[in-house]
Amino acid sequence: MAAPRTGKRILWVDDEVELLRPHLLFLQARGYHVDAIPNGDDALELLRDHPYDLVLLDEQMPGRRGLEVLEILRREDPHARVVMVTKSEEDRTMTEAIGRRVDDYLVKPTSPRQVLSVVTRILEGSAIRQQQAAQDFAARFGQLTQLRQGAATPRDFALVYQELVDWHIRLEEAGETGLLDSVEAMATDLRRDFGTFVARAYPGWVEGSQERPDLSVDIVQQWLVPLLGDEPVYFLVLDCMRLDQWREIAPLLAPFFEIEEDLHYSILPTATPYARNAIFSGLFPDEIAARRPGWWDASDDEGSLNAFEDELLAEQLQRITGRRVPTHYEKVFTDRDGGRVLGRVRGAAKSGAEVIALVFNFVDLMTHGRSESPILMEVAKDEASLRDLTRQWFERSTAFTIIREAARTGAKVVLTTDHGSILCQRPSTVYARKDATSNLRYKFGVELRTEEPDSAFDTKDARALRLPPGRPGTNYLVALEDHFFVYPTKLREYQSRYRNSFLHGGISPEEMIVPVATLTPRPR
């Protein structure tokens, strides 16, 4: 049965118009309006006066060749959609056509069905993808709801969260925005259940319960150490990268690597001083403080607590392997020094470094800076725009350059993050003394309490978080779901400044369930 009429207009430029009659009739029967014209000059005149949705352009015609017509057409209408149709199978012809940005390429003889397939993909592909995405989500919705309601293990929650991320991205890319509310409603329910689950289970995880997931402290031993060998292994940590941000940059890596993706749980608080130190040391904060009391100043300041990652990594590798592992470490805050960083990395690889570890802080700086910058707040106003901004940075970043360098030399890469972030909407009032820590998603302090008990995981036991013991009477609050802490004396200021901000440090799938990927170079 013929498809509904589309009203889309096609111009077919070919000197053998009469031989194309079956093709024209086939397209017309599917609802397309098709005009045929035998030469390039007449086609250009027609295109100047009448808009067409697609041009099928023969390459080998008397007078102007198809590529010459394409060159003129691109100057006059850069966005015209063009399919090159030719008898030539020479690579040069195809390469030249692709270089001039044809949307597709067909080699004669071609069947009406082949032509229809290309036309449909170009003209109807977006609508078809939107419709199919909606149908697939509707068919999956009931099962996904059951999976969320039945989630009872770290793996259960990770699988549901991962699928919701994928649905959010797929529906958004397909333009099916009407169903995003359903995805977000399910994500809200998942956050609530996840917060309850983690608050109950986390103290057991950090004491080594059998059902605990892979945590920040497991990354080096689980993923990095097994790759040690003759070639250097690159170990990259992109600070504050959510799973959906990883999904956005992973396609950029696929041409260079086979990608094996896993997930791990960030330790609490999901903040750089704790989670990233845990990655590099393989230790919980209380263990680090016990071994190196001079490093730990009981604050949550990244500058003081994350100054020794290179030493922590070297010690962890020696502890696991029983030998000193030659390691090169860099912390990169800006791409302005990218050339020098790449030079030092190449030098380390040549001088025998077995591990080349690099931390990139851009995503974290962008997330923090968004709350302080109206321009950045507008550019990264929601999850989708944050993903887009992450991809735009990564495409031109020193991180991507170094990862491609690894692919070029045949070196494997372990890429991960310390924690993610969550778009916070709900302020929760806390009462605290002046010495309480300043983070908006977690607070430690004496006589600390929250007005809404359901908004936070609240404990007086530092051991429940594997934190160094505080002063007597210290409370530890970690925000749940999308809450953020505000003081009653600064309620309006904090609400206006931090509502709708991406924050981290608390308990949510977005902050805790984060990617770790092993990248194996494709054969060159």
Image (spheres, helix red, strand yellow):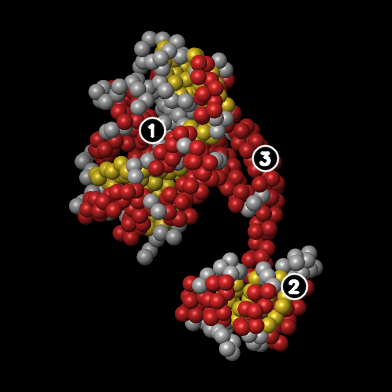
- What residue do we see at 69% from left, 85% from top? 17
- What residue do we see at 49% from left, 80% from top? 93
Quadrant of res 194: top right
Residue closer to the observer: 454 or 370: 370
Badge 1 is on which residue?
272
Quadrant in which the C terminus appears: bottom left
Mark 2 or mark 3: whose residue is earlier in sequence? 2
Label 1 neighbourhood size at 10 Å, few (<14), some (14-19), many (20+)? many
Relative height, residue 234 to residue 429 (above, below): below
- Percent coordinates x, y for residue 270 in the rendering: 44, 31
Relative height, residue 311 to residue 57 (above, below): above
Mark 1 or mark 2: whose residue is earlier in sequence? 2
- What residue do we see at 22% from left, 45% from top? 326
Amino acid at dot 2: His
On residue 33, the disc is 2
Say whether residue 303 is left or right of residue 431: left
- What residue do we see at 46% from left, 51% from top? 392
Amino acid at dot 1: Thr
Mark 3 or mark 1: whose residue is earlier in sequence? 3
Badge 3 is on which residue?
182
Residue occupying the far bottom of the picture: 62
Label 3 neighbourhood size at 10 Å, few (<14), some (14-19), many (20+)? some
Say whether residue 215 is left or right of residue 499: left
- Percent coordinates x, y for residue 387 in the rendering: 51, 46
Amino acid at dot 3: Ser
Relative height, residue 489 to residue 204 (above, below): above
Residue closer to the observer: 225 or 196: 196
